[in-house]
Image: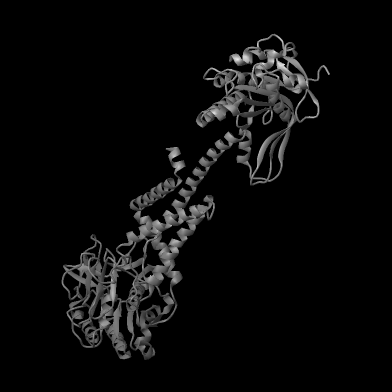
Amino acid sequence: MYTFWRDHPWRLRSAVLLVVALLVGGLQAIAPQAFDALEQTIGDWTWRIGSTARPERRMVVVDIDEASLKQVGPWPWSRGTLAKLSEKLQQAGVVVQVYDINFPDPREGDGALAEAWKAAPVVAGQIFSLDPAVTPRVGTVAGALAAGGCPPFAPRSHGFYGHPAELLQSGATIGHITPRTERDGVVRKVPALICHEGRAYPSLALAALWRATQAEGATSAGPDWVWSDAQATGFGGGPLAPFAWLTSPSLPGLAVPVDEHGDLRVPYRLERRAFVSVSAHDVLNGTVDPALLKDTIALVGATAFGIGDTIATPHATVAAGLEVHAQALIGLLDHRLPYTPARAGWIHGLAVITIAGLLLLVLRRRAIPAKRLPIAGALLAVACYGASATLLLQADLWLPWTNAALFALLASVALATAEHALTRAQRERLSAHLGAYLPAPVARRLMATDPSGRVQVDQREVSVLVADIRNFSSFAAHRPAEETAAMLHAFCCIAVDVVEQHGGVVENVVGDSVLAVWNAYSDCADHPQQALLAAQELLRATRTLLAPTQPTHEDSPVQPLALGVGIESGRALVGSFGPARRRAHAALGEPVSVASRLQQMTLDLSMPILMGPQLAAQLPQDSTESLGDYLLEGLSRQYTLHAPKAWAELVPTEPLWVKSATADAHGGDSGKWSGWADSGASAPMRVHAAIQLRDA
């Protein structure tokens, strides 16, 4: 499984993204309230940042404030005072009087107030209880929609605070002022319609907007709002349609979106100071400029704290209840009410896919290092919020974004972790490859350092072994390529095993030649002895491999294979050099040159192993025998060559090689050495006689 993911990184990345998507979906299913609370809180900040202080002239707040209570008296005011306030507003020429006030109990003066309301378009508020545990039944409910029945999405009423029957005789339009208070105490939504005893009742803002469009003196069975759901045509269709919406023949072109709970989201686009407000006391005294009220919607409500009509809004933790209806009414006038599309889930899925694609694109283009992917994820999360805020403020779309942002964060961290694991696996694989092509200590050093173009060498006292297969070129020319490759592979494996078992490191493999060093990368006190033991073991271990598979004779085109080994000790340079983009690693120095020449001399001297003087000097005297002084090819001075005492045991058992190699000494007839000559058993020791200088 490990190698499967390592060898298919894109499958791993796709699997990581899928797991993160499932995790985010699971978290949202387990704790939807946490997601919603975060979105609502950030949404409140969006309203605060994006709201405007532009004065709103279409509506004027007639404020029952602290000054009014001081001048007129404590609340509740008499119905006569309220009748006088209504008359003053009518005289000022307001389009409609909207009372964010409930009058549940019959009182003295109801007749006077009803007469005042008959003379003006008025909308009054009633309250429904949405809590099954609270079931008041005070006054009379009025203001049902002209259309019968209730929409399935409307919340059900469990109680009410209506109006006295005498006030309802005024013909005032009634709208509910029931808030939808969320868990944190903030009012962000208002039920568009509330179902009570099989009839639907609109909110105060919906009733006020409808009443403002009616001709003066017109009568109606009730507001003409009708509802449609996502299965119906309208609202532009497509994926951005809301769960349901309301339309009115009196307001062509306006569609009021509502969610699956029957709520309309209040648009808090105006700062509180943007509303024009006049004191109710000034209206009663006639000190307000009539031009300020003429042709406006007068929203009558209380901001005085003593009345107790306080709520929390996105703009303030303590605000008057009338602010909710004021903001909702302005949103209706502007035809701009935010909503969540019914197919928001598909939009979320598209956002997640887009984020996943961007993260994969960053990885593919290597735009940033994998370890910085969490930064990209954080930026994408911020972009999710930015896109959501922009859509809310510019396109009236409330799109939950927390799941996409959380996916961006978790996916970026998970991908960075996966990339780290992939990089580590690749480093391990690269290290293994480097260890196969370079000495393992060199590979480890390269993995731990940055590329460099400097010379990096050390001087060490080393022992060097050079081994080469004789007659291999002829063998390769007459044998199938597969057999040749198999031969080289087997020889290389044996050589590496033997060298490493004796504490050495294979420095280089070129064709049928192997170069190994001791004491170059780690301390090896008896490196000369270990090099000799490795050479002897290598000859024994390759004997079966190099043995001919069919009988040979002197005229055979392919002569038997055999191994020649040269070893020497001395001071050498070990390291790397060359430009950073193309380095070379090697062991350089006299012991390397001498060991290479000695390996070549094994053919001419018919010896399986030859040792240089420096290595032989570090071995027991009774373990070697001197072969005399020789001038090695390409070198300027003589070297005393040595062979191990038991060298004859290392000679291959093939008849062409052993017919003279079993002699007790090598100083007699040169014919006994001819078996190691490349030209056959009858060839003399031509180089041995030509360049031997011991008797000169």
Q: For residue 438, which quarter of the picture?
A: top right
Q: Nearer the viewer, residue 578 or 638?
A: 638
Image point 56% across, 37% down: which residue?
433
Image point 61% across, 15% down: which residue?
656
Q: Left or right? Give the position of 25 relative to 107.
A: right
Q: For residue 96, which quarter of the picture?
A: bottom left
Q: For residue 317, which quarter of the picture?
A: bottom left
The image's colour scheme reads one colour
Q: Is residue 214 visible?
A: yes
Q: x, y percentage for residue 611?
A: 72, 21
Image point 16% across, 68% down: which residue?
198
**Residue that sits furthest to the top in the current view:** 664
Q: Left or right? Give the position of 531 relative to 201.
A: right
Q: x, y percentage for residue 487?
A: 54, 27
Q: Left or right? Give the position of 490 relative to 76.
A: right
Image point 66% across, 23% down: which residue?
565
Q: Is residue 529 visible?
A: no
Q: Quadrant of the N terminus?
A: top left
Q: Quadrant of the C terminus?
A: top right
Q: x, y percentage for residue 674?
A: 68, 16
**Residue that sits furthest to the front in the current view:** 555
Q: Nearer the viewer, residue 330 or 105?
A: 330
Tell me if residue 267 comes above or below residue 132 in the rendering.
below
Tell me if residue 31 comes above or below residue 42 in the rendering.
above
Total marks shown come to 0
Tell me if residue 561 comes above or below residue 367 in the rendering.
above
Q: Nearer the viewer, residue 514 or 607?
A: 607
Q: x, y percentage for residue 29?
A: 33, 52
